[in-house]
Amino acid sequence: MPMPLRPGKLVLAAVSQMLLLGCFHVACSDSSGSQACFEGACDPGTCSMDGGAHCECPAGYAPGEGLTCIPGSGSGNIRVEYVGPGEPLDDITDYRLCVTAEDMEDRCESFSVLEHPHGATIEGLPPGQNRTVTFVGYDQPAGDARWSGKALGVEVEASSTTMVEIYITVCSDFTAVRNEMETRRVFHTATRLSNGKVLVAGGFTDLSRAGDRYTLTATSSVEIYDPRSGEFSASGLGLGRARALHTTALIPDPGGDPEADKVLIAGGSSSACWVADFPHGIRPVVSVEGSGGDLSTSTADLIDMRSRTVSEIVLTPSSARVQHSAWDLGNGEVAILGGIAPATDEPLATIGLYSQEREDFRNAGLDLYAARQGMTVVPFGQASVLVWGGNHSDGSMPGTFAEILTERQDGLFSRIPNFVGIGDPAFYSAGVAMDDVKVLICGGMLIDPEYRPYAVQPEILDRVYLLDLTANLETIDTIPEGMVYPRAFHTAAALFDEGSHEAREVLVAGGIMRYDILGSQWVPVEAVEFYSIEEGVFERKQIHGSEVELSEARAAHTLTRLDDGSLLLCGGFTLDIVGLAISATAEIFNPRSRDTLGQSD
């Protein structure tokens, strides 16, 4: 029976059967078209059936004379069936399918939507694993690329036709995924797994306003986003405790099984406050006041994707924390940095260290130079991270707003970069590595009354710092014009050309841009801007007269880079007709250019 097709997908139809011990489980059709499955003690490669039946041979076998399946060493095929919101999509006339791999020559074929409205076949593909299948749709045979998608890790089998789904999205713009998350979330985590899927865990799901703040309540739910289908689905898992403002770290299977990852979900809180008014002076916007007895802050969950189980790990007293950061050290070790002490609502300088070998936490034996919460941590180079902001000022001076942590064979080491006197003690910034030593930091909030003595609410920044972190030669520079808009609780990601490891642009999305005095609330936005590394400026972009922006306002959302280079943004604070709300939606940014270069992919 043909697979049902859904808008916005590319379906590569296929049939394959399973080789059983000494015999084949073969699907046959009789002359009336009904289907039956037969399993018996037949000779390998042979099926014996009533007259009128024919063999559907398993992968690696081809039909022989009579009702037989014989070993096949030939090529494989791909049958492509494509549909869109209309039939076809109303803004493409042609599409191109490519199959590439290191051990084969690239195979690309172009198809007219008019001539091939329901599908096309690429034949004669060499069998093998780790094939990449790419789809690009154009508005004319040599026109602009409008839609694209990619599937990695596809296996092409001899004498059979392979099936794979590709969710296609609009080039150089945002496209909503096919469904909403089951649970609305803010201050959650989204972790890309080794199989390419994304595990979305925890977060605050409810909010209520009381006086100068919102009370946020967390969820324990976990769900999975599948880039092949463009959909969220239930995971069948749940965290041991409801938590948000936690961290996540992927621990891949040592044997390389992409279905056997473990995911460490550490710390966080089951409730928190989002401060919306400041009658007694400015302060951090996120507070966990009164959560000292919250067991979410002093535990971690270890999710085993192979066994589909969740086990709890008790943190050491020095490791309990909220709104901290995680640094994946590799080899099953994860450092958790700074954060808020649940008992005091004050920032921490301690570092906790998780070991997968021992399945426990211990003190790392090293503290940060300054206590920090709401800081930005940017990995760079081979084994280092930049820790930026989240510190309280030293009176009218910025204090130790930056430090660099490095992992060596004999442990962790911290140092203060040469530029530490030039900067801000900003909370809730965003940062991104543009290559091995260059990092961009943008936006954030100033929340210290001594640093901003006349402020009536925290100041949102449009400042941009360009850092060169070459060891012992660190430099810092600024962009005088700053960003187009001030932002905090936003996200940033480097955009790369195909095959390049050096960024061409940096995308900055969403965040809190302003404070609504009349409504006494922070206002999340849908605005997006791009930093051109070559030109050194931030700019908004338009496509056919329309601004490139998020499908809805977002702040404190997640941004996850998928295997194909596209970006998944999900959840966060948003706005509804009443005011501040929590989002259950998600969208994809497809960084692919709209020029015709894609036709050679």
Image: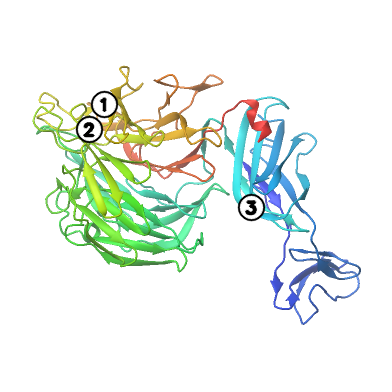
Q: Secondary structure at mark 2?
A: loop
Q: Which residue does the numbered mark 2 point to in the structure image? A: 426
Q: Quadrant of the C terminus?
A: top right
Report if the CB atoms under discs 3 and 1 are less than 8 Å apart: no
- Badge 3 amino acid: Val
Residue at (43%, 26%) from the top-left corner?
Answer: 530
Say if 542 sits above or below 138 in the image.
Answer: above
Report if the CB atoms under discs 2 and 1 are less than 8 Å apart: yes
Q: Quadrant of residue 484?
A: top left
Q: Quadrant of residue 236?
A: bottom left
- Of label 2 and label 3, which has the lower sequence position? 3
Tag count in the figure?
3
Q: Residue furthest top?
A: 481
Residue 552 position within the rendered picture, expressed as x and y whole percent measured from the top left: 43, 34
Q: Which residue does the numbered mark 1 point to in the structure image? A: 461
Residue 239 position within the rendered picture, expressed as x and y whole percent measured from the top left: 35, 61
C-alpha span from label 2 to label 3? 45 Å
Give the side of residue 62 with respect to residue 157, left or right: right
Between residue 301 and residue 599, name the one nearer to us: 599
Callout 2 environment at 10 Å: few (<14), some (14 to 19), or many (20+)?
many
Can residue 358 be seen from the camera position used here? Answer: yes
Residue 154 got which mark? 3
- Of label 3 and label 1, which has the lower sequence position? 3
Q: Secondary structure at mark 1?
A: loop
Callout 1 environment at 10 Å: few (<14), some (14 to 19), or many (20+)?
many
Between residue 580 and residue 365, name the one nearer to us: 365
Report if the CB atoms under discs 2 and 3 are less than 8 Å apart: no
Residue at (16%, 48%) from the top-left corner?
Answer: 348
